[in-house]
Image (cartoon, helix red, strand yellow):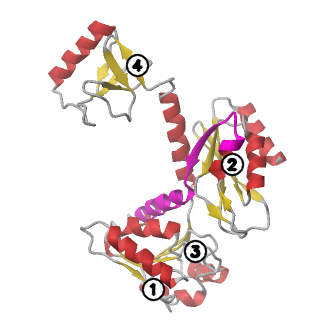
Amino acid sequence: MEQLNKIIQNYKSKSKKKKLCFFLGSTKKEEDKEYYLTPLRVKNSIVIFGAVVFNDEVAKKILKKIDGLVDYIFVDVEKKFKKNSQILDLEKIAKKTLSKTKLKNYKGNDFAVEETEILLNKLMSNQKSSLSKKKIIIIGCGNIGFKIALKLIDYGAKIYAFRRNYKSLKLICESLNLIKPSGSKSKIIALKNFPTNLKEFDIIISAANSNDIINSKDIKGIKKKSILIDIGKGNFSKNTIVKLMDKNLFVYRLDVTDAYFRCAESIVFNNQKNNFPNSRVEIKNFNFLSQGIVGRKNDLIVDSVIKPKRILGICDGKGSFYNLSIKNKLDFKKKIKSATGIDMKYD
């Protein structure tokens, strides 16, 4: 707790302009310690750091400690079952505990899925073939593995999945094959047994909840252009990593830092942009609405309802905008200026 306090005080004294964003998460993995702090990262005007907790009492202590000391507190909304069959619900705990700092939600597993897709596209940019030509295995088809499989089948890849509980896996794969895009000919195949050798796969994604799932015998004869991603952290044994590096092959450890920044920046930006008591203002019989709201016929969607500078569109009353000519836009601008005195640009 002292370390946590030092981090907060250090950055508050250094720069008042930076927004401090604290992310509180949890994991199914059991640890000896009650919690651990995640690395502090700085980008532009955002500072992100946080903690991963394993029980509700520690979550409460941390939330009480930082309430009012940071600008935003993000909590992972995914509920985790613990060994004692209790559910760790960080969102519920935060809503009961916090009274000063703004509370926001995030989904840590979705960050992992998002970054996996980004990483794969980045790695594939150096290859002549596309993901649709690749044979992919997903080891550990739980929440994250399921979502990754659903994303990758959109690319037309041939996907195989493995998890210890074959009965559950079969149902998961059947579900995925039912909800995949109708135009996709690809199928997700449930493997009853762990492959005797992973060399037949172009991409190996491990999202299991156990260590040392993949050993050196599993990677004999593996292709030089194979892509290996460890989402579960520790899924590849130490010996396997050494042998792969001897072959100039790397295991990519998924880094979700960028996803945390995108989440924080989006919230901070939207709060600055939409800092007003309500999202609808009427001026001289003109209704000004903020972005993201379905307006009535002829309502104006603007960049800010308090100090509007740009018209983003005129509502048609059906959830879309009128398609106006440049002349009509200019005429409408003049009409608003004449009635309200507000001179705006029209996108």
Q: Earlier in the sequence, mark 1 or mark 4?
A: 1
Q: Which numbered dot is residue 281?
A: 4
Residue found 60% across the figure and 85% down from its top: 215
Question: Does 174 lie within the magenta span?
Answer: no
**Closer to the camera in the image, 218 or 295:** 295
Residue found 52% across the figure and 71% down from its top: 142
Which region of the structure is painted magenta?
95-122
Q: Earlier in the sequence, mark 2 or mark 4?
A: 2
How crowded pointer 1 is (Cα within 10 Å; few <14, some 14-19, many 20+) is rated as some
Q: Earlier in the sequence, mark 3 or mark 1?
A: 1
Q: Amino acid at mark 4?
A: Val
**Element class at badge 4:** strand
**Element class at badge 1:** loop
Per the image, the residue denoted by label 3 is 208
Residue 102, by quadrant, is top right
Residue 208, by quadrant, is bottom right
How crowded pointer 2 is (Cα within 10 Å; few <14, some 14-19, many 20+) is rated as some
Q: Of the residues tagged 3 and 4, which is closer to the observer?
A: 4
Q: Amino acid at mark 1?
A: Leu
Q: CA distance from mark 3 to mark 4?
A: 51 Å
Q: Amino acid at mark 3?
A: Ala
Per the image, the residue denoted by label 1 is 191
